Image: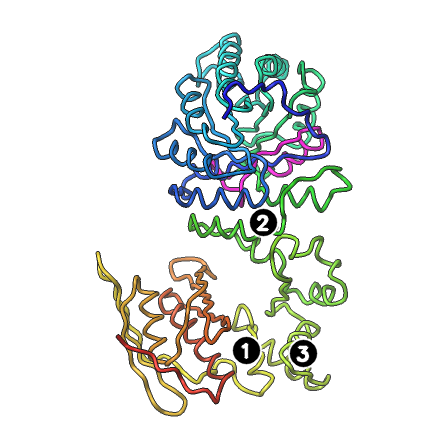
Amino acid sequence: MNSDHDVSAQPMPDADRVRIFDTTLRDGEQAPGFSMDRRAKLRMAQALEALGVDVLEAGFPQASPDDFAAVAEIARTLKTTTVCGLARCQTGDIEAAGRALEQAQHARIHLFLSTSPLHRQHKLNMSRAQVLDTAVAAIERARGLCHEVEFSAEDALRTEPEFLVEVFSAAVAAGATTLNAPDTVGYTTPAEVVELFEYLRRHVRGAERVIFSAHCHDDLGMAVANSLAAVSAGARQVECTINGIGERAGNAALEEVVMALKVRAPHFGVDTRIDTRKLFPTSRLLTQLTGQAVPRNKAIVGDNAFAHESGIHQHGMLKHRGTYEIMRPQDVGIAETRLVLGKHSGRAALRQRLQTLGHTPDDAALDELFARFKTLADRKREIHDEDLQALALGHDPDALGPWRIVQLTSATHLGGSASASVRLAHTDGHESSEAAIGDGPVDAVLRAIERAAGHRLQLTDFSVRSVSEGGDAQGHAQLTARHAGRDWRGHGVSTDIVEATALAALDIVNRIERQTPAAQPAVVATS
């Protein structure tokens, strides 16, 4: 990297493009419950580069040796995304960031310093003049260590506007190329954000040579709204995180900001370079790496974002997708809209799903099926295709087989593997018992059921979520397994998650046998 790169030669800001500054690996990762090791950070960084983020804040190099190493590894690896390291306006922080970013194709040091009277008095014990001098000295030092410098006035939205103008004007003169006015504590409102950014763009000296950035927190639930307000007032960088993770209530959610700018493009008149088709996969990768799931009703990437259960909504969707969806699920990387069948569903959705499954009942038969469907829906939260198949064939969905669990035991051995044993009964009258060991109780149960039923299953996806509240909450296990070149999905519900997993595995085995009745069970080794 050329350490004497001339920051004054940076290209002029592009008025119709908003740069996406992703801080998932810094502000997001430092939040409780979201910590990632170095390998996970690198994997996430590569996914974010593929997503198309302009700037990736890889970490805070001075925070720890591991953080330094993670930033350095990401800087060496990424090719198209600017890699950024955070630093306080202190010599040690700045030099650590510079060293960590030495091998980056394009490097940015992100300096921050509190400017609000509350922070100046109680956090820094510094005067206005001291804050100003410290910021200028830090920017001048950082300029020689990277390609570009960003300066953040921490708690900017609670800083006196005239002092913020003074600090930012000095930052531009010192060589900063991006000015960030963060709502550090999520206190402000969209109207106030618009007023401030318009004021800054009018009064900061050299404003036309820099990019103004918004970094909003979600303490009052307005991080995305405030970020979009900043864009409407001329900000051309938004700092955000995948799934909105971050300190306290989190940061502005990247996927929400990006899709708002895309869906409402005529209103905002700007775009981003994000490949929106990768939003859902990137979101799911983060949940896998952190173990923290997104709420079902999360905008853009939640399980319910493109799911409809209400009969009125389903009827409208079957007529025209635009009645209840403002974007296509494929635009964010989700395969298709789901019309979820439950107690709120209507005849139109039931008829459509039955037709998909190969059943075309006449009106009288549909009325009879609909009555039985409603009775079943009152007992089950969600109706699956196998339930509908049974209804259409005149069977009891709760009596689906052919296998059922007669006995199930599992044990976890501290410091070692887990074991499980299962006895299954078949509708033809015979029983099968098997035992297995595994990496954990879930793995052991799956292996035991696989052996007892005689079907090889390659697990490809597994999730457990609560479907009720309290100490006796039920867990819903969902498994996806590959068998004979095809993916099969199973569901199970129980207050015991191991039992829920066993029921889901048995669901897959039963689906296989019901749909391939002539096939003989595969011989599965028990060793």
Q: Of circles 2 and 1, which is in front?
A: 2
**Residue furthest out toward the front:** 2
State which tag comes first along the sequence, 2 or 1. Answer: 2
- Categorize mark 1 by other alpha carbons within 10 Å: few (<14), some (14-19), many (20+): some
- Residue 386, given in percent of the width and then of the height, sits at 54, 78
Residue 387, numbered label: 1
Residue range (magenta): 223-250
- Residue 1, given in percent of the width and then of the height, sits at 49, 26
Q: Of circles 3 and 1, which is in front?
A: 3
| Amino acid type assigned to the residue bearing label 1 in the image | Asp
Residue drawn at (68%, 27%), measured in percent from left and top? Answer: 13
Q: Quadrant of residue 503?
A: bottom left
Residue drawn at (46%, 66%), measured in percent from left and top? Answer: 478
> Label 2: which residue?
279
| Amino acid type assigned to the residue bearing label 3 in the image | Gln
**Front-most of residues 493 and 205:** 205
Indicate whether residue 95 is drawn in magenta: no
Left-right relation of 334 to 85: right
Left-right relation of 23 to 205: left
- Spatial separation of the CA atoms under disc 3 and disc 2: 32 Å
